[in-house]
Amino acid sequence: MVTDDAVPRAANTVTVLGGPTALIRLAGWTLLTDPTFDAAGTEYQDGPVLVLKTADPALKPAQLPALDAVVVSHTGHQDNLDTAGRTVASAATNVFTTVAGATDLGGAAVGLEPWQTRTLSKPGRTPLNITAVPARHGPVGTEDITGPVTGFLLHTDDGSAPTVYVSGDTVDLDAMSALAGRYRVDVALLHLGAAGFEELGDVRLSLTAVQAVEARRLLGDPLVVAVHAEGWAHYTEDRNHVQQVFDAAGTPLHWPTPGQPLTLPDPHTR
């Protein structure tokens, strides 16, 4: 459980729970990304497409630790915020998302404009900044179909914890280059899987493996953690393909075991 006591840097971890959902422990804070907790086999009709969940989450909502904040890249698609995930988000003290997403969620949800920062602060803890990073959920011209989306940068002013970038569903490499020009990125949770639907043709709504390799380069070669790559039927690139592309490029990629914490690198050792 989260306490107000300071924790050592070694306690900075990411625990992927399935799909885009991850628990991030950073500078003593506990955050949850894009909550998806419905059971495997759940289907959703989203406009012309059918979205199918194929894997259970590694934890159930009742098993989650106390959360300081939930960050939601966008609220319009069930593979980033499903029915049970909405319940989790609605119970959180702090929720950060897009401006449109905040209107959708209501309650404690705060909508962030691109590059806007909010800070989590509490006595006994290092303040944690949450900065909205521009994102685009598909090629230029698909914005009216996919709706607004945002990424997030989690960072401290004193650099005592690694800086973590959560990409959200985006293929906007220019925004990642701009991010690297503003901030150092130590860890990148990249939404992979090259999400796509037959009804949309060859359009890919999240990073292909080739794009992800380039994204890592643009971000300054951070530790890349694969998320949003398994657990739903609409990913068009599987783990083997993604790994082969990364291996061919000589680029490291971490595939976390769902439910098992990954210790993040000390920023002072990079």
Image (spheres, grey):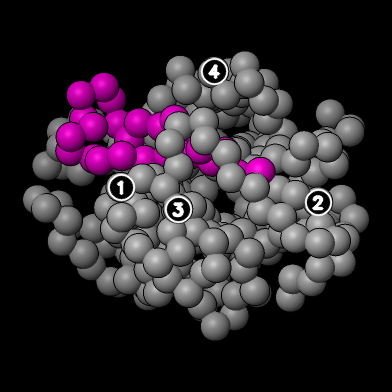
Residue 253 visible to the viewer: no
For the residue labelled by badge 1, is the local secondary structure a helix, a strand or a loop?
Answer: helix
Residue at (83% x, 37% y) in the render: 158
Residue position marked by numbered label 3 in the rendering: 110
Contact flag, marks 3 and 4 (Cβ < 8 Å): no
Above or below, comparing residue 70 to residue 144 in the picture: below
Q: Earlier in the sequence, mark 2 or mark 4?
A: 2
In the foreground, 152 or 265 = 152
User: Disc 3 to disc 4, how far (Cα)?
Assistant: 26 Å
Q: Residues within 10 Å of mark 3 (few under 14, many from 20)?
A: many
For the residue labelled by badge 3, is the local secondary structure a helix, a strand or a loop?
Answer: strand
150 in the magenta segment: yes
User: Disc 2 to disc 4, how far (Cα)?
Assistant: 27 Å
Contact flag, marks 1 and 3 (Cβ < 8 Å): no
Residue 126: give its label: 2
Residue 177: give its label: 4
Task: Report the amino acid beneath label 2.
Answer: Thr
In the foreground, 20 or 238 = 20
Residue 100: give its label: 1
Q: Residues within 10 Å of mark 1 (few under 14, many from 20)?
A: some
Q: Residues within 10 Å of mark 2 (few under 14, many from 20)?
A: many
- Residues drawn in magenta: 129-152
Q: Quadrant of the C terminus?
A: top right
207 in the magenta segment: no
Q: Earlier in the sequence, mark 2 or mark 1?
A: 1
Contact flag, marks 2 and 1 (Cβ < 8 Å): no
**Residue 189: horizontal and vertical position, in percent?**
57, 42
Task: Report the amino acid beneath label 3.
Answer: Val
